[in-house]
Image (cartoon, helix red, strand yellow):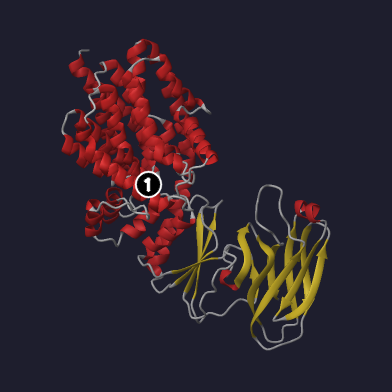
Amino acid sequence: MNRRWGTPVFFAVVIWLFYVASKGAYRGFFSADDLDNLAWTRHAELKSFIVGLVTPQFYASNFRPIGHFYFWALGHAAGLDFRPYVAVLHVLHLVNLGLLWMLLGRLRFDWAARAIGVLFFAFHMAVFDAYWKPMYVFDMLCAVFSLLSVLLWIDQRRWMSLLCFWLAYKSKELAVAVPVILVFYEYLLGSLVWRALAWHLAGGAWFVGQALFSQGGRGGDYGLRLTPLTLWNTLDYYASQVLLVRHAGFGLALLPLWVRDRRLWWGLLAGALWLGPMLLVPGRLFGAYLYLPLAGLAVAVAALTERFGWKWLAAPLAVWLVFNYAEMREKRRAVLAEAEETTAYVYSLADLAKNGRDVDTVLIDSAPAGLRRWGVEGALRYTFDRDDLELIYLEDVDHKEPRADATLAMLSWDGPLKKLYTMRRTAALGDASYVEMTRLTPVWQLKRGWYQREGNYRWTMPRATAEVRRPAGAREFQVTVNIGPDYIRAVGQATLGVRVGGVDLGSRTFTANGWWTEKFAIEAGAEGNVEVEFTVTPPFRPKNGDPRPLGIPVAAFGFR
């Protein structure tokens, strides 16, 4: 086959292989970050994206106008239909393959070297999430404009290159490395002209200075931290991801000693520089952040191919692709299982919001493990289409009490059944006199010191409070607990003290495992809500790495 038809056929095969490998992404669903972005961009005005695009400002809030515009536009056009979001990701990835092909051509690689370099970039499973999760659209957009900036610079279209550098930075901060990458290009492969690079370098220095001033020493996931330990942790993580083998990426630093090709040197430098900002952010370690750096490594792979011949690299590349496909199958199962849970949870919230417009307070008992707190909050803000919902997490030690007049919805997630159970409490509805730890526990009666339900019981903290309705004439209060063998072996014996309505009812000591129902006599009193307080000694700290201070597993309590 001649080269005229070879390139279209090659890309047709690559596109087909990529579709086969990634078609499962269309059965996925939004991650926590996606839902958060959809929620806040829903009510943003178009002009805020335009202002953010033209303003030479580093945003400490991680506002990235181009990427966030993607969520704004598709949020309005597609809503919760996940497929268009993935389709845009895949189109952007194919665009980047084309740009990489063009870049390798500008660097005068032969056809086979360009093809192998593109294949290396096209199917790398370290960046699997970038193909499947909209939250990585920032990395893909940054790659589009960064590669364009480099290509236009090589073509001596300086001002267009500068514009694309600006757009790349407004997609994601990794682009701040582009000016330095252009310096090394000129030094290694061109003729360094400082005056021509002045605007690129000035822009990069401006944004770097703002970032260091704003984020340097800051806590949280996005804080910039540079210590020997944090640098080693980030370096080791990405070095282990880049070739999918522990520590293997460090070996790339030895290639310049072996291969005297300045294009290889430049490709390795470009990959390292594009990754550089992420080495200072130990709170955000994700393989997908290698997406743009892999474009630089693809240049190095092309150089190796041309140096040793494609026949020597074809077999290793075939093994590499098979290994990547096997890795993809494992990751696909996990991502689709998580997506199934998140889909059920979010669409159940949408049904609740449709029929519960009067709800003003949401009490969150439990949620899917993969849907982090900001994802739950984003899903609630998006489905209820309001920002004034009061959100209360039962597990928070210092959580606020729901207002007595609040119209409250309770959310309890059942992981094994992949089902969200909801209950509503209007201001007129009274409290239960007996509380059982089931899917429909009125958790608003659990005040302080309770963890998420586990089956048909719920761990307390060493001190826990609740509220129940005391029926008129009630003379007995009872508590059912589930004492496990590991628990009793660890503490020897556990003592549970009970107070109801400020009156000490006494205590019970448990020295054997099993289900125990303890009854406490109580003086008759008027009907009404009373506070219940449980105290447990000694506290239980499991040996499985669970950091929580535990009290006792309660299955039920109240007046019978």
Q: Nearer the viewer, residue 508 or 541?
A: 541
Q: Is residue 67 above or below residue 302?
A: below
What is the x, y in percent for residue 351? Answer: 40, 63
Q: Amino acid at mark 1?
A: Met
What residue does disc 1 label? 135
Q: Residue at x 17, y 38 (%)?
A: 160
What is the x, y in percent for residue 246? Answer: 53, 28
Q: Residue at x 71, y 86 (%)?
A: 473
Q: Nearer the viewer, residue 453 or 92?
A: 92
What is the x, y in percent for residue 417? Answer: 54, 52
Q: Is residue 233 left or right of residue 526?
A: left
The quarter holding residue 180 reads: top left
What is the x, y in percent for residue 341? Answer: 48, 50
> Can residue 471 be seen at all in this image of the molecule?
yes
Q: Is residue 543 above or below residue 111?
A: below
Q: Is residue 255 left or right of residue 10?
A: right
Quadrant where the C terminus sits is bottom right
Quadrant where the N terminus sits is top left
Q: Nearer the viewer, residue 294 or 421?
A: 294
Q: Residue at x 47, y 41 (%)?
A: 285
